[in-house]
Every structure is written in structure tokens, then in C-alpha cells.
Image: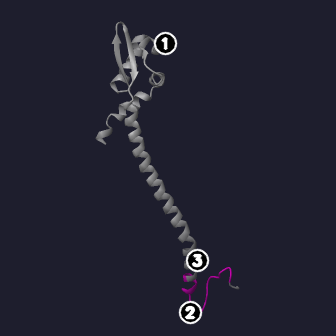
Amino acid sequence: MAQYSGLDGTFQALADPTRRAVVRRLGAGPASIGELAAPFDMALPSFMKHIRYLEQTGWVSTRKTGRVRTCVLEHERFDAIETWLDEQRTLWEGRTDRLDRFVTAAAEPADTATTGHATAAGTAGTAGTATTHDEDSPA
């Protein structure tokens, strides 16, 4: 599990709708802080906290050219999440496949076991007396 210690912050970064919107916007290409902040009704220092958190968790990197700070989406985060999700998918597909086999196997012998059990119970009474009747045999 130590290999996934960074995933907590990665998922936590996406838990906030403002940060998800920033990541979505950066999916279209790099953008300046001003462009990214424009749709949000918050002060720039508050918005910068979101950008810094996205930087700390590896979602974005920023570079400053003159007076403009530009953000770029880092695709390595997607790779880490995809690797983790693939492992989870494999694990759960294996579990559900085993459950399906178990339920299918349990349902098939239950039909024959019930018939066999009724016959065994019928002969368990006193010798020569049947206590159960099959549908095919006359009563």
C-alpha cells in the first residue's frame, strides 16, 4: 500500500468542485491563473490556494513568464490513478467471477441434493415404509 500513499491527496484534490473544474479546463490546454480564476466568484488569493493544492498533489505545474503564471496539467496523475483502478478492477472482477461460480455451482447441486435427500429421508423410516412420495410415483 505504500506505493499508493500519494493517491489520498490525488483523490482529495478532485473532491473539490473548483479544483475539478480547473483540471477539466486544463485538459483543453495550458491557461494563465487569470483565465482559470475568471469563472469563479472568489478572491484571487483564495483561488491560488486551490492552484497550490493542485501543484502539491501533482495535478498541475506552473511556470512564470514575465508577469503571467501559466498552469499545465500533469498527466502522470492520470497514469497513477489508472494503474490503481486497473488493479482494483482486476481484484473485483476476480471476486465477482468467483461469486458467480459459487452461486451457479450451489444452485445446480441443490436441485439434485434435494431429490437425493428426500429419497434418503424416505428410506430412513421403518423398514418397508416410505414417508415421502415423488411426483412421478403413484401415491
> Which secondary structure lies at badge 2?
loop
Quarter of the image holding residue 31? top left
> What percent of the width, then of the height, locates residue 132?
62, 82
Q: Amino acid at mark 1?
A: Ala
Amino acid type of the residue that numbered disc 2 sits on in the rendered structure: Ala
Q: What type of secondary structure mainly makes up the magenta span?
A: loop
Q: Earlier in the sequence, mark 3 or mark 2?
A: 3
Spatial CA distance of label 2 from label 1 is 91 Å
Residue placed under numbered mark 2 in the picture:
127
Q: Which residue is mark 1?
A: 38
The mark nearer the N terminus, 3 or 1, is 1
Q: Badge 1 local density, few (<14 within 10 Å), some, or many (20+)?
A: few
60 horizontally vs 38: left or right: left
Find numbered disc 3 in the image and state the secondary structure of the residue it sits on: helix
**Residue 67 at what x, y percent from top left?**
36, 6
Residue in the image at 36% along x and 35% along y? 7
Disc 3 to disc 2, C-alpha distance: 20 Å
User: Magenta part of the protein: which range?
Assistant: 120-136
Q: How many marks?
A: 3
The residue depicted at 61 percent of the width and 84 percent of the height is 131
Q: Which residue is mark 3?
A: 115
Q: Dot 2 surroundings within 10 Å: few (below 14), some, or many (20 or more)? A: few
